[in-house]
Structure formats: structure tokens, C-alpha cells
Amino acid sequence: MKTKNLIVSFTVLMIAWVLLNWTIDPVNLIIGASISIFLVVVFCSKCELFTDIKITPKAFIYTFIYLFVFIIELIKANIDITRRVLSPKLQINPGIVKVKTKLKSKMARLILADSITLTPGTFTLQVEEDVFYIHCIDTRCGDDVEKATEEIVRKFEKYLEVLYD
Amino acid sequence: METIKLIGAIMILMGSFSLLIAVIGLLRMPDVYNRVQAGTKASTLGAIVSFIGVGLYTVESWGDGNWLGRVIILIIFILLTNPVSSHVLMRVAYFTKIPLTKLTKTDMLKKDGNTIIKEGENE
């Protein structure tokens, strides 16, 4: 498990280095690789950042599907917020709803909470184990936990389930 | 190349429009929570779209003048930090008991009893 964490951390650092320099010059790559190895060995040998990520072809494809779904949701929700802000009669029904997630991994929950926050109209206010309290700008579901979960969490959760253990 | 530059310029314009919506939302919303919502939301998409626009605008000059890679890094950092910082803002607002607006329909966190405040009292 530990090697997987190191390899994934190294890959992430290396991608960041290549993107920052925007060149694939061999000298540049060697410098980047040595710095990445140093950082990974010093800082990531004990952390558990990527220990529960899955490295399979299916997970790889689902990462891109997840990003695509996320961007679509982002744009859809942004249009929705724009409509609400610009309408003369400020159409909002704010409220705090409670949702439950099936995800076990800490990293997956972090990504889920971040995705909910980044999607306009919903905002993670408090996380307690598998319960998320979410501030909605438009609460259609009220106190119904099941319905709120279906509406807010499910669309992201079904992809994250594949990505993480 | 001219077309890509034009697309970049249009994307920067769209990003600016999104940020303008964020400001209008910030002014019009009734309470802290909805203001944070309007502010952070539009700024995410606004910033992302403007950054991609800048990347496309400089795409013709390979090497040092090209910003596309750096812009992708910037977008990743925004996606990582923006939700955390705004989440902290909203949490602090809630747990220092800044009132929700009268329009609020439901508050499940209050009904369930917020554990954080209870823990603080015990200490």
C-alpha cells in the first residue's frame, strides 16, 4: 500500500513540474524527477493521501468521466445561479439539509464535499462521519434525508464509488 | 491562430461576466450564507473560464510565452483551495451564530443539535 502512495504522489508532482515548465527537455525532466523523488521520500513516506485510490484501467476512465460530469454540473448550476441573481424577485429558498453518503474512504469524502461546495447552489457546512450538512440556495426536498441525498450526492457518488475503495 | 485567439478573448469576456454576476449576487443576497454561495460559485467558473481564455490567447508562442500549462496548474489550485476557504468562512459564520435569513425553509443542523458547540461547552 505504501509503494502505491509513493508512486501516485511522484506522478502528481511530476505532472505539475512538466505543466509548470511546459517543455519535455530531458535535462529538465531529470531535474524534475530528482526533486520529486526527494519531496516524496521526505514528506510522503508517512502520509496516507493516496492509499485508498484504485489504479485500474476502469478507474482511469472513470476519473475522466467524473471530471466531465463535474464540469457539466458546474456549468448547469452556474446558469441556475445567474438566473436567480438577475431575476427581479430574488427567487431563493435557502436552508440547511442533511444528506448521507455511502463512501468509506476519507479522500473520497473530501472530494465529494469539495465537489458539492464547488457546484453552485449547494455548500457543505458540516461533515460528521457519513453525514453531510449542506446549505442549499434552493431547498426543494426539505427535511427528507433520502430525497436530498438522491438529489445532491448521488450524481457524484456513483463515480467516486468506482474510484476509491 | 487568429481563431484560437478570438476564442480565448471570448472566454475571458465570459469569465468577466461570470465574476460580474458574482458581485451582483454578493450585493443582492439577504444573508452571509447566500452571499458566500453567490461569491464563491461564480468566482470558480469565472476564474476557470478566464484562465483557459488566457491560455488559449497565448497558445501560439511555444516555450516561455505559453501560459497553457501554468494556467492548468492555477485551475487545479483554485479547485483545491476555493472550497476549503469558503467552507471555513461559512462554518465560522454558522458556529458564531450569525442568524440565517427569514426566508430560510429548514435547518437540519439545528434540529440535530450541533455537536461542535456542545464539545466546546464541555471544555
Image (cartoon, coloured by chain):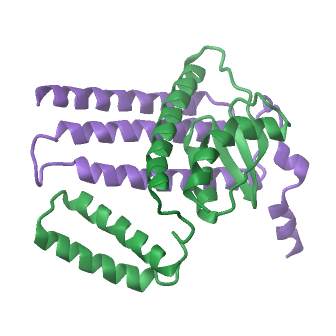
Report whether B24 appears left or right of A124.
Answer: left
Which residue is farthest front? A57
Q: Which chain is green?
A: A
| Among the 4 quarters of the image, the one containing residue A154 | top right
Tell me residue A46's x, y (percent).
Answer: 52, 83
Q: Observer-nearest residue: B1 or A135?
A: B1
In the image, residue B84 sits, relative to residue A151, either above or below, namely below
Tell me residue A130's x, y (percent).
Answer: 75, 57
Q: Which chain is purple?
A: B
In the image, residue A163 sits, relative to residue B47, either above or below, namely below
Tell me residue A23's x, y (percent).
Answer: 15, 59
Q: Observer-nearest residue: B4 or A125?
A: B4
| Camera sees residue B100 | no
Report whether B54 appears left or right of A121.
Answer: left
- The residue under the point 60% across, 22% down is A84
Report whether B81 appears left or right of A120.
Answer: left
- The residue under the point 40% across, 73% down is A7
Tell me residue B91's x, y (percent).
Answer: 69, 54
Quadrant for the C terminus of chain A in the image: bottom right
In the image, residue B80 sits, relative to residue B52, either above or below, namely below
| Camera sees residue A127 | yes
- The residue under the point 49% across, 54% down is A59
| Among the 4 quarters of the image, the one containing residue A21 | bottom left
